[in-house]
Every structure is written in C-alpha cells, then in structure tokens.
Amino acid sequence: MTTARKAACVLAAWVLVAAALSDLGSARAPLGSKPQREFDYFALSLQWPGTICASTRHCCASNGCCRSEPLQTFTIHGLWPDYDDGTWPSCCRRTQFELDKILPLMEVLNKYWPSLYCSKSGTCFSGKGLFWAHEWEKHGTCSAPVVQDELQYFTIALDLYFKYNVTEMLSSGGIQVSNGKEYALSDVIDTIKHAFGGSPQIVCKNGSVQELRLCFDKELKPRDCLTTSLTNGSVSKSKHCPRYITLPTYDPLVLANSTVEIMSQFDEFVVPTALYTA
C-alpha cells in the first residue's frame, strides 16, 4: 500500500470516529452521563437536627443550627426520585434554580427546610449556591413526569412533609424525639410503619438518628423503602443503626456577642459516597 493510500485510509477512519463522537455528544445527558430513565419512586429525606447540630463548631446566617431556639422537629433534606435497584438519577434537565419562582414559599422553607451547615451547596448547573438550588437541580430536575417545575417540586415536598408528620407519628407512639432516651430501632420502624403505611429508611450517626426517609410511589402514595436501615458493608460503621437508637437534643452555639457570625471561609461538608449527597 502506498504512503498516499495509507494516509487516505487513516483520514477516512478519523472522519468516522469524529462522526461517532459527534452522535454520542448529541445524545449525552447533562454532565456527560448516559440518558437517564424515568424514576421508580420518591424518597422524602428528613434530617434530625439534634444529631447534626451537635457537631456545629461555628455559625453563619444560613445555618438552621444557629437559631436561638433549638430545632426540635425533623426538617426536610430533600425529595429524591430513586430507582428500585438502589441507584438514583441526578442532574437530568439543564435548568438553573431561580429563587424568584419559590418566593411564595420562603417563610415555610426557612422554617422547615433550612440548611444545617455553613458550607455552600454544589449544584449541577449554577456553581455553588443555596441548599435549595442543589436539591432542585440535582433531584427536582429528575422528578418528571410527576413534577413539572421548580415551584411544584418544593410544594409537593412540603405537602408530604406536613401530611405525614414524622415527629407527631413518633410522639403518638410514645417515642419522644427530644429527650435523648434510647429506643429500640424495631419500635421506631414499627411506629412509623403503622402510622405511615410503609417501612421507612433510617440513617444513623454514632447510634443517633441522622436521617429518616419516607418513600412514595409516583402517585404520592406511601410505600416501603428498599431497606429499613443502612447497615450494608459499603457504609461506614458510624452510619449503622444499632439495636437501640437515640434522637438527641442539642444546645445552640451562642457567640459571646449573641450575634451570628458570618463566616467568610466555608468548611466543606463531605458525605460518604455510599449515601445520598446533601
């Protein structure tokens, strides 16, 4: 084969490769991932402030742990579309968070869906920003066809939170969520299952409840979560839920001048890769 003919063959091969790469690029989902299928169910993830806020070492204006009165109810982490195989979609639709769209909900969001950290949250499309921006861009954009827009995403999450009040469920079952007493994990699960109609998923930190998740089908009806507690080997031992667990209280961090310190440098909050991210 002559040199010229070899060069022509190489050029033709590169043209085919370039065309293939172009086709792949046009079909690629946001962030370079494969196109993501429709989700199977929702998990409403709730945080227990007593466990998280006990680790607060400095305060900032956005941190719910720094309020003068301690938070004594579960607060919302997010409403997450998940798959039945234990995985989940993320960053599905390229749309940026717009605070103006949820202004009617700001008062209730600040009270029941606060960030419990000072670090800014990473987003899919907007750099670092508000906790709510992260939840919408990462999870909300994957919630179609149930959720069509940003306002609807936050409204549905809040409606489910109030309709299925976990703090009241536990209290009605004799589990007081603010006294730090130990309770059998099985009792907590059974109490939620009886009141809610489905088994929850519970995440612990050093024997205390850190998160509790309620699961819903795509008609927003209660269903069982895939597992009742994260005890598999891929999660660090500190995240396991032992047989007896606590829902501790905490003392808000009070600065000497009784004001909230605005931190110019944010400490990054890192979540183990085996868990959902903040």
Image (cartoon, grey):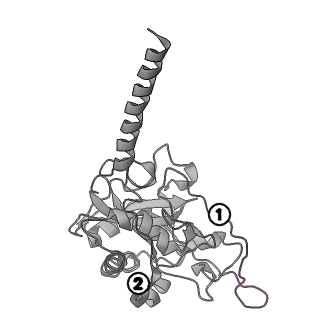
Q: Which of the two residues, 66 or 90, is positioned nearer the viewer here?
A: 90
Image point (46%, 10%), residue name: 2
Residue 33: x and y in percent read: 41, 48
* 223 versus 256 height, above or below: above
**Identity, as a three-letter code, of the amino acid under mark 1:** Glu
As drawn, is 48 to the left or to the right of 200?
right
Residue 51: x and y in percent read: 57, 69
As drawn, is 183 to the left or to the right of 225?
right
Crowd band around label 2 with a 10 angstrom C-alpha radius: few (<14), some (14–19), many (20+): some
Q: Overall secondary structure of the magenta stretch?
A: loop
Give the label, 1 or 2, closer to the camera: 2
Image point (60%, 78%), residue name: 63
As drawn, the label of residue 268 is 1
Q: Secondary structure at mark 1?
A: loop
Q: Which of the two residues, 155 or 196, is positioned nearer the viewer here?
A: 155
Q: Secondary structure at mark 2?
A: helix
Image point (24%, 66%), residue name: 145
As drawn, the label of residue 243 is none
Crowd band around label 1 with a 10 angstrom C-alpha radius: few (<14), some (14–19), many (20+): few
Please provide the residue range marked out in magenta.
253-265
Q: Which of the two residues, 192 or 133, is positioned nearer the viewer here?
A: 133
The residue where tag 2 is placed is: 102
Q: Please state, as top left, top right, bottom left or bottom right, where the N terminus lies in the image.
A: top left
Q: Is 123 inside the magenta-drawn segment?
A: no
